[in-house]
Image (cartoon, rainbow, N blue to C red):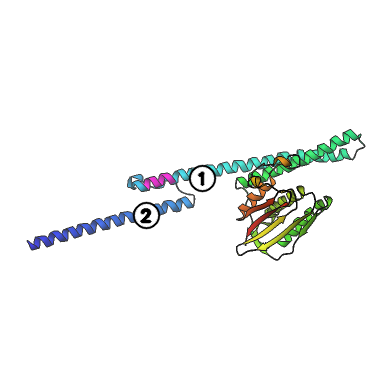
Amino acid sequence: MNNAGWIFGLLCFLAAAIIVFWNRRRTRKIMKNIERMLDTAMDGSFTETIFDESEMSALETRFAHYLSASEVSSRNAALEKDKIKSLITDISHQTKTPIANLLLYSELLMEEDLPASAKANVEALHHQSEKLRFLIDSLVKLSRLENGIVTFAAQHAALYPMLENIAAQYSDRADRKGLMLKLNDTDVTAVFDPKWTTEALANIVDNAIKYTESGTITISVTSYEMFAKIDISDDGIGIPESEQAKIFSRFYRSEKVKDREGVGIGLYLARQIISGEGGYIKVASIPAKGSTFSVYLPK
């Protein structure tokens, strides 16, 4: 009786050990299959035909179906991105020459001895052509940014040379309005793409000059542990608190500035660029007293 009990107990133990061993082996096999699926998905070579569904568990089968659908979606997205890139390139090329010709011929006409009314019409034509060129260029940049076509070439560099170039670019325009454009000295460095960051900051400086009638526009830098903050402050018309979140929206323009030049793209582009570089923009403003746009770039 005792022997029979020992034998029965031993058999139960062996059966349990076999079941545990079989389950562990099966689990290991499933995990290896899933790992292989993930590896092929990551290198872009995943296809469901690689795996024999008859030998796969329900979990593996569902996972394979999911990865297959994801791969198809990824390929479709890549194709759409390529189509958009081609379309943007075509629009840019097809519009560049006609707009350049409009500007050239309007400039030639302005040099002619024309009646005052005709001269005013030609100047209006030239101005609208400039506006059209700016709009097309902005829309092309916008499309490239929104569709992930732009690749930022970020590098660790000093901020002052870039800010000095921006100040030099806008100093004449500020002078013509009787404004003082002031750049404070700094030795702070950050990680940024010089070309695109210049584009973003220039849009903010351009707005500061546009919406300031008298006073000073100041560019200054503050260093923090993780970020470098670039402040662009003005003594302009200011922005009501109710509109401060809206000004970074695409094509948004406040009712009180509808009569001024602009299409409402500059700040939206600036935010897209800075966020693409791992930074962010904040605004603080008091109506009729001025605004400060703070651009944070990673260090």
Question: Which disc is residue 74 wearing?
Answer: 1
Q: Secondary structure at mark 1?
A: helix
* Residue that sits furthest to the bottom in the current view: 187
Observer able to see residue 248 = no
Query: Percent x, y for residue 293?
Result: 68, 53
Q: Are marks 2 and 1 in contact (CB under 8 Å)?
A: no
Quadrant of the rendering where the C terminus is positioned: bottom right
Which span is picked out in magenta? 60-66
- Of residues 285 and 119, the one drawn nearer to the viewer in this rendering: 285
- Of residues 161 and 201, the one drawn nearer to the viewer in this rendering: 201
Rendered view: 81 above or below 158: above
The residue identified by callout 2 is 31
Q: Amino acid at mark 1?
A: Ser
Which residue corresponds to the image point at 71% horizontal and 44% vertical from the top-left? 137
Q: What crowding class fits label 2: few (fewer than 14 Cα within 10 Å), some (14-19), or many (20 or more)?
A: few
Which residue corresponds to the image point at 28% horizontal and 55% vertical from the top-left? 23
Q: Secondary structure at mark 2?
A: helix
How many marks are shown on the rendered structure?
A: 2
Which residue corresponds to the image point at 6% horizontal and 61% vertical from the top-left? 1
Observer able to see residue 191 = yes
Which residue corresponds to the image point at 64% horizontal and 58% vertical from the top-left? 297
